[in-house]
Amino acid sequence: MARKSSISSSNNRWRYINPSYYLKRPKRLAFLFISFVFLTFFVWDRQSLIREHEAEMTKLSQDLLRLQNQLQEFKSASAETMITTNVLKDDPIDVQRRGKVREAMLHAWTCYENYAWGQDELQPQTKNGVNSFGGLGATLIDSLDTLYIMGLDEQFQRAREWVANSLDFNKNYDASVFETTIRVVGGLLSTYDLSGDKLFLEKATDIADRLLPAWDTPSGIPYNTINLEHGNAHNPGWTGGESILADSGTEQLEFIALSQRTGDPKYQKKVENVITEIRKNYPADGLLPIYINPHTGATASYSTITFGAMGDRYSLSQIYIHF
C-alpha cells in the first residue's frame, strides 16, 4: 500500500512537465506562457544592462588612459614651453592704465622723498612735511607694500634703509592705538608678507609691544591712546573717559596676524578678549553704541548709535575677521 502511494506521488510531480496536462487546463497554460515571457524579458534586460555597463566601463577606461597620457605629456613639457603656451596677451588699454597708475604713484612718492622724507605726511601746496602721527613715518610705512607690488625697487630699498636705520618708536608721544595699529603695524606686516624680510616683522613686533599695555584694563577693553615711551594709556578727554567702539573693535586683524607670524599668542589673546567682552553686553537689536566703558565693559546708554565715524570700522572689521 505504501509503495502504491509513493508511485502515485511521483507521478503527480512529473505530470507538470507533460504538455497534455496544460492542454487540458488553458488557464495554467496561459499563466505558464506569461511567466515565460516575463522571465525572458527580465533575463534579456539584465544582459542588456550588463553589456551597456561593460561598454561604458571600457569607454571610461579609454578616457582615463587618454587623460593620463595627456597629463604625462604636460608634465614632461618644459617650463618655457608651458609659459609660452599659456601666457595671455595683455590688453593694450589695461597696460596703458597700469602705466598711468604707476606714474601717479611715482610722482607722489618722488615729491614725498624730496619734501617730507621720513615724516608722516606731505602738505602738497606748501611742500612741507608734518608729523601728525608722532613722527613714525606714516606715509612711508603705508607705501612700502605698494612700492613692492609696483616693482619700484630702488624706491623700496631706500624706504627699507630708512626703516632699518631711522625708524624709532621710543618717542614721548601719545599715539592713537587705532591709527598706529592700522597704519604702522598693518603696513609693516603686509610688507613682511610680500617681501619675507624679517626686518619688517621685527619692527611690527616692537611697535605692537609698545601698544599692548593699552589693553591692560579691568575689562580688557583697550584705552585708545598710549604713550609710546612710557606705556601710559588713557582715553581722550572728549570721550568722557570712554573707549571708542570703532577703535577697540578694529585692531583684531593686525594683532591676530602678528600672533600667527611670530608664534606668540599674547597679541591674539588680548584682542580676541575684546570681542568676547563686547558680546557679553550685546544688545538684542544688535546696534552697539559708539562708547564702551573700559572698566566695566558696558556700553554707555547715552551714547550715539551710528554706522558713521567711530562706529563704522567695527562692523567692517568683524567681516574681515570672520573670513
Image (cartoon, rainbow, N blue to C red):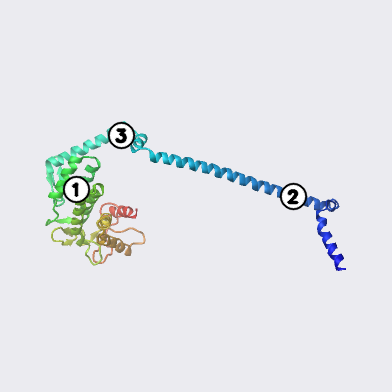
Considering every residue shown, the one lying at the far top of the view is: 92
| Residue 52: % across, % down | 60, 44
Quarter of the image with the N terminus is bottom right
Residue located at (22% from left, 35% from top): 103
Tell me where residue 258 sits by quadrant: bottom left
Vertical side of 7 occupied by 126: above or below: above
> Sequence order check: which comes first, mark 2 or mark 1?
2
Q: Is residue 94 visible?
A: yes
Which label was assigned to residue 94? Answer: 3
Nearer the observer: mark 2 or 3; the answer is: 2
Tell me where residue 228 sits by quadrant: bottom left
Q: Amino acid at mark 1?
A: Ile
| Residue 208: % across, % down | 20, 57
Q: Secondary structure at mark 1?
A: helix
> CA–CA distance between discs 2 and 3?
75 Å
Considering every residue shown, the one lying at the far front of the view is: 3
In the image shown, does 29 or 12 lie closer to the viewer? 12
Q: Secondary structure at mark 2?
A: helix
Mark 2 Cα within 10 Å, few/some/many (few <14, many 20+)?
Answer: few
Asked whether, in this view, residue 260 is left or right of residue 4, the answer is left
Q: Amino acid at mark 2?
A: Phe
Which label was assigned to residue 158? Answer: none
Which residue matches tag 2?
36
Which residue matches tag 1?
141
Asked whether, in this view, residue 76 is left or right of residue 13, the answer is left
> Sequence order check: which comes first, mark 1 or mark 3?
3
Q: Amino acid at mark 3?
A: Asp
> Sequence order check: which comes first, mark 2 or mark 3?
2
Residue located at (20% from left, 40% from top): 153
